Amino acid sequence: MTITVFGASGAIGKLFISQALDEGFGVRAYMRNPSKFDLKHQNLTIIQGDLHDFDKIRQAVKGADTVISTLGPPLKHTYSDFAVLEGHKNIVKSMELENVKRFIPIATPSVKSAEDQSSMLTRMPSIMAKLFFPSAYREIVQVGWVVQMSQLNWTIVRFIAPNNQLLSKKIKVSFGDTKIDWGISRADIADFLFTQIQDKQFIRSMPIIGN
């Protein structure tokens, strides 16, 4: 099985790639600057490109079994270049053209699900994001819309406060109906993303995960 990873040079992307390689998967890692990526493996292919390069993105997803995106908007108050949104538009279009169906991106609960129950978990992230990171809020919501409107078998994995704690494998899923800690380790996020490659439970769904 071959997995294409966008956001490969980020912390969650690196953890995911290491786990996938350890499990024997082939990985294509798409990134703008490979010099920042020090992982080497016989089953790892590095593809250099940016999020505006449709042809490179299409090349990266062609023939893949699953596509993972750990891309997220920058946590700045305001900005004008919605590169992450443009990247997801290019990823979705490329996957549809290449008939690659399984897509697993990340988001926050600012991206709303029809399954959400009204709670602090589902309401507060949007309130805080609109106040402190309005551009990032607009971008992530639009990313969620692009993914949901696609013909792909997507799972949007939502979380709030990633940290650098060790892998616990004690992950809870909520849609606002179950109490969970808002913090979750990046290692656990990567592990949950990996489980979704073959888990069908959350196809076209948006689980919120926490420890």
Image (cartoon, grey):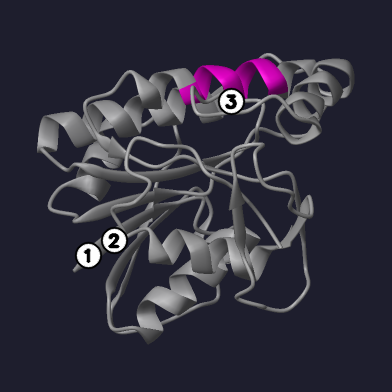
**Residue that label 2 marks:** 3
Give the residue type that dot 2 points to: Ile
* Image marks 3 and 1: residues in contact by CB distance under 8 Å: no
Taking the spot 70% from the left edge, 30% from the top edge, the residue there is 122
Taking the spot 27% from the left edge, 62% from the top edge, the residue there is 198
Numbered mark located on residue 2 in the image: 1
**Residue that label 3 marks:** 111
* Image marks 1 and 2: residues in contact by CB distance under 8 Å: yes
Marks 2 and 3, the one that precedes in the sequence: 2
Residue 131 visible from this viewpoint: yes
In three-dimensional space, the C-alpha distance between marks 2 and 3, rounded to whole angstroms, equals: 25 Å
In three-dimensional space, the C-alpha distance between marks 3 and 1, rounded to whole angstroms, equals: 28 Å
Taking the spot 45% from the left edge, 43% from the top edge, the residue there is 105
Residue 36, by quadrant, is: bottom right
Numbered mark located on residue 128 in the image: none
Lateral position of residue 186 relative to residue 22, left or right: right
Q: What range of the chain is rendered magenta?
A: 137-144
* Image marks 2 and 3: residues in contact by CB distance under 8 Å: no
Badge 3 crowding class, 10 Å Cα cut-off, few under 14, some 14 to 19, many 20 or more, is many
Give the residue type that dot 1 points to: Thr
Marks 3 and 1, the one that precedes in the sequence: 1
**x, y percent for residue 5:** 39, 55
Badge 1 crowding class, 10 Å Cα cut-off, few under 14, some 14 to 19, many 20 or more, is some
Lateral position of residue 78 relative to residue 23, left or right: right
Q: State the quadrant of the C terminus.
A: bottom right
Q: Secondary structure at mark 2?
A: strand
Taking the spot 50% from the left edge, 63% from the top edge, the residue there is 192
Q: State the quadrant of the N terminus.
A: bottom left
Name the magenta segment's main secondary structure: helix
